[in-house]
Structures are given as C-alpha cells and as structure tokens.
Amino acid sequence: MKILLKNNKEEIGKEIASRIVELINKKPNTVLGLATGSSPITTYKELIKAYKEKKVSFKYVTTFNLDEYVGYKREKDSYKYFMHHNLFDEIDIKDVNTHFPDATNPLAYDKEIELKEIDFQVLGIGADGHIGFNEPMTSFDSKTHITKLTKQTISDNSQYFESIDAVPKEAVTMGLSTIMKAKEIVLIATGKNKRSAIKALLAGESKGCPASILNRHPNVTIYLDKDADPREN
Ligand code: GLP
C-alpha cells in the first residue's frame, strides 16, 4: 500500500485526475469505479477541465458508482444526481455507460462488474472507516447489498440534506469483495475527522474498520493531507 501525503485537496485532485486521464488515453474503454461525497470533487473538477481542454474523451469510458441511497425524497438527494451535477453532465460520457447499483436487484451489479472489470476505483472514507456504504462489521466477503446507515453516517451526511430527518436510513452499496476486484484503487482522506479511520486502516485488517480490507489489495494508493495523517502529530 502506497501512502502519499499532499498539501491539500486540490493537489490530490490534480494528481488522481492526471492518473485517470493517462489511463483513458492508453485505454479509451477504461472502466472507472466512482465515489460521491466531498473527497472526489477536486478530482472531478480536474477531469472536467482536462475534457474541456481536449486532453481526454470519455466517449468509450464506463463507470460504476459505489453506492446509492434507498428511499430518498427528492431526485436532487440521489447520488445519481450528484454524479450528473459534478461530472457526467460536463463531459462526453454516454448515459448508458454510467451505472448505479439497483436496490431491487443488488447482486446483478456484481455480475455486471465482473463482466467489465473496474480498472481504477476512486474511494473516499467515512469517519467510521466505511467505504461505499460498508459500515463497520460488514463482512469482508460481502457483495453488492442493501445496508442500514449508522447514526454517525446519517449525521455526517445530513449536511447535504434539508434536515437530518431527510437523510435516507438505507443505501445499496458495492460490497467489500466487489470493491476489492478493482485492478487499482485510490482512497482520498482529508481533514481531522478522517484521522482515526486512517489510523485504524493502517493498523491492519479489522472488521471494525471496513477500509482496512484494502491492506489485502496489491495496488492501493492512499492520498492524505496533513490533518488526516495519523503519523503526524
Ligand atoms: C458517504 C459515501 C462514501 C464517502 C463518504 C465520505 O458516506 N457513501 O462513499 O466516501 O461519504 O464522504 P466525504 O468525502 O464527503 O467525507
């Protein structure tokens, strides 16, 4: 596992986006695994910039998003909306090539992903160590499934909703074993509230920190800023 300490989110976004652009230019039909939340936003901004500067085309790219809320009240609250707003609507990706897990048939997502194979997976991390919506104690063998969100996740994510009551209580997420199938994974963690999750991740495998499964993967890079780095004091 490679750990890269960067000055800020902007630097992280630039570096990850340039890795993605390079990959797509080598392999135009690259399959990306994508995350929502604030962590990947600078990466998406840089990808849009690269597209507008004609440095890359997403015409043949396929994407699989990590997760989606179940039972959101307004379309605006969905991760699908988030992705369209923060990336898809600004680039030349084809709608049919963008995928989200379907709560009515979660396992179908694993089958689709197995057929395509994710080349490059972008991850954020929850303050409790979740990746996707795999909350603490999720089985390391889990496939795409419906999950209940913890109180902490509901409270952390309430900033994006009208009120805490509007935050869905359930989500459908790629499982931990689904995520591990990606050929290459990057995880972004910035800010003090991520430090203890990163500490647990770096301490080795434990079900209490779902992200710690990444210790088993042969090609992972963790991008940190100083605040999220437990090695800093
Ligand atoms: C949500 C998402 C995760 C994301 C996490 C962290 O719970 N399901 O995929 O990594 O939030 O979000 P943020 O990047 O906003 O801190």
Image: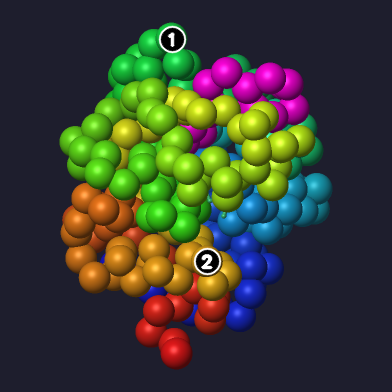
Relative to residue 96, is residue 150 depicted above or below? below
Determine if the magenta segment contains residue 123. Answer: no
> Going by the picture, which residue comes out furthest to the top?
104
Query: Residue 109: horizontal and vertical position, in percent?
Result: 38, 21
Q: Which mark is residue 104?
A: 1
Q: Amino acid at mark 2?
A: Asn
- Residue 113 at least partly seen: no
Mark nearest the camera among 2 and 1 is 2
Q: Amino acid at mark 1?
A: Thr
Relative to residue 73, is residue 230 depicted above or below? below
Q: Is mark 2 within 8 Å of ligand 1?
A: yes
Read off the magenta span.
65-80
Relative to residue 171, is residue 153 depicted above or below? below
Residue 173: quarter of image: top left
Q: Residue at x 76, y 35 (%)?
A: 162
Residue on which disc 2 sits: 193
Q: Residue at x 63, y 22 (%)?
A: 72
Residue 198: quarter of image: bottom left
Q: Residue at x 24, y 32 (%)?
A: 142
Residue 75: quarter of image: top right
Q: Residue at x 38, y 55 (%)?
A: 129
